[in-house]
Image: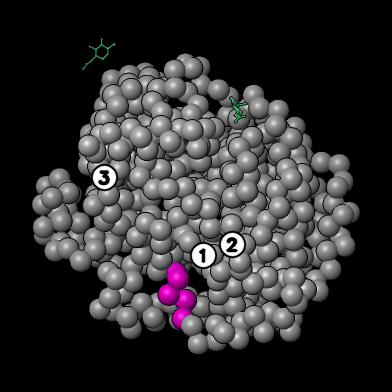
Amino acid sequence: MKKITFCVVVILLAVLVIGIHDYMPSLSTIPVYQSISNTQSTNYAEKTPVHHSVSNIQSVKAPVHHSVSNIQPTTSGKKAPVHQPMSNLQPTIGTLAISHFKDVPDMTLTVRMSSNVTSLLNFFYCTMLRSLALYWSSKLGPLGLILDKESQDDHKFAENLQQYQEHLGMNISIHYEPLPKNKRVLTVVKGRSHGYNRQLYSSFIMDKFISTPIVAWTDTDAKFTTPVTRDNILTGNKLRVKGMNTFQNNWIQGWDKLGIKMIGKPMPSDFMTFFPVYIWRDTITNCRNHILNYLNVSTIEEAYIQVGSQDVGIMSSVNIIMTYAYYFEKERYDWHIDIGNVDLQKYNKLRLIPGHELTSPDLTPDFHVTLHDKYYKDDKNIVNRQAYCAAVNNTVLNMEQNIKQMCEPFKTNEMWLLFEFCNTIKQEHLTTWCKNKIKHCSSMIKEHYDKTRQLVNKGVYNLDLKKVKVVEEAAKFHNVKCQPFL
Ligand SMILES: *[C@@H]1O[C@H](CO)[C@@H](O)[C@H](O)[C@H]1NC(C)=O
Ligand SMILES: *[C@@H]1O[C@H](CO)[C@@H](O)[C@H](O)[C@H]1NC(C)=O
Ligand SMILES: *[C@@H]1O[C@H](CO)[C@@H](O)[C@H](O)[C@H]1NC(C)=O
Ligand SMILES: *[C@@H]1O[C@H](CO)[C@@H](O)[C@H](O)[C@H]1NC(C)=O
């Protein structure tokens, strides 16, 4: 019975999502839900128009000045150089910006993208890029896109986007991935599109395109909900990782089975429950070498085909890489695993290999800077408003009257949203970590906003809604029309 349901779902989804490149972990069981179709939402931006001038947007359709080097496939991807002085959008980055992120290694906010899938374009512009423009500091590193080398559309997509770098105050580096040599890679996981297979496979070679020491990996449907601080990324010199016990969902068992085939170790937790996933670039290299060794094959294509063709489940590349990191490089990362309301000893016995048990320091709460929009129902468009209001609250920024008015209802709301990731499937920490520690979670929220307020006051984040408009302008190239942001 289960099998039949699974097949029906797979066929339905194959029809629904043909060509979708995006990494969609829960597709096998979850109806595709797009929270951006919030047609009934109150449209603040239109009722009380935001008075930021957007007149300068038209002037950016200047020739693209990027040098050829950064649009060639390369194993040492470079930051896309911006050849003109930064626009007036980020004039105030002062010493605090530099000192706040000074000891943070360079990173690339990395997205595997394909421009020929409409739903991906929608998420990319409306969800990811609009929120990124507000809440990701260019001081952390560029947005890096890995695209299909042979796709003319992807080249056009990149050219269009790079024209807006200055007005977004953010560098965008483009990396072109050639088609895999062995075309079986594109079809090996049955019921999955070429694009989907390619994306899964691609995850194991990101280090060949991204050259920064940290790959901050995210999906096109991740929505930033707060400015990102140093502490959201690093504890000392360890990268923060979040995980969650979601093993009650049947697709997780498929991921686990395939992961075991690929690296020989069970998932200690589900790592597809937060974005961005911060990965040391060489962890990806090491993981790939481990896979080649473990499977006794000479290329990652062979490995992907060998494991993918076994039909024991779907694959989760994030989980394979982070599971590798857990077993082989645990001390390079700072683990925050929510095992739910389960006894640690029992959990260890059930899930972990002796000698690799989770310990209580691994279970320390942490919160999110994004949510997974595809699986977060927000018909009334509350998330963006609440997030923005929390970010501007008590800062030196001069808010427009309409923003003040919009924020009035949120005045007494705490940002519990930061402890949620999805709500159409249950992925939140309000009933686990925060259940008996409301005070503790609450003080984490407060502490975070004390920090973001400083960053805003010093101009590290200017929360300038003009940048949202710039993204909307860029999206027009693909006839993507976003719902109002606020
Ligand atoms: C973009 O990259 C160039 C070259 O690496 C750098 O000089 C510039 O500061 C970067 N701009 C931003 C906004 O980070
Ligand atoms: C998207 O582009 C890829 C590569 O160019 C191509 O193989 C695929 O068929 C395209 N998909 C759609 C839906 O056009
Ligand atoms: C690994 O593969 C090579 C070549 O296919 C083969 O000669 C060798 O015996 C294999 N080693 C093991 C341990 O399976
Ligand atoms: C705004 O900031 C003040 C002062 O830090 C705080 O008391 C209040 O809870 C904050 N409001 C929101 C909605 O975060």
Q: Secondary structure at mark 2?
A: loop
Residue 310 rendering spot, x and y as whole percentages: 28, 24
257 in magenta = no
Vertical position of residue 89 compared to residue 474: above or below = below
Q: Callout 2 environment at 10 Å: few (<14), some (14 to 19), or many (20+)?
A: some
Mark 1–mark 3 Cα distance, whole angstroms, equals 25 Å
Residue at the spot of label 1? 378
Residue 217 rendering spot, x and y as whole percentages: 49, 48
Front-lying residue, 325 or 222: 222
Q: Is residue 312 left or right of residue 185?
A: left
Residue at the spot of label 2? 38
The mark that comes first in sequence, 1 or 3, is 3
The mark that comes first in sequence, 1 or 2, is 2
Mark 2–mark 3 Cα distance, whole angstroms, equals 30 Å
Residue at the spot of label 3? 250
Contact between labelled residues 2 and 1, with CB atoms less than 8 Å apart: yes
The mark that comes first in sequence, 2 or 3, is 2
Front-lying residue, 417 or 150: 417
Q: Residue at x 37, y 38 (%)?
A: 9
Q: Which residues are magenta?
A: 414-418
Q: Secondary structure at mark 3?
A: helix
- Residue type at mark 2 is Asn
Q: Callout 3 environment at 10 Å: few (<14), some (14 to 19), or many (20+)?
A: few
- Residue type at mark 1 is Asp
Snapshot colouring:
one colour
- Residue type at mark 3 is Asn
Q: Residue at x 26, y 30 (%)?
A: 312
Quadrant (top left, top right, bottom left, bottom right) of the N terminus? top left
Vertical position of residue 354 compared to residue 393: above or below = above
Q: Residue at x 59, y 73 (%)?
A: 385
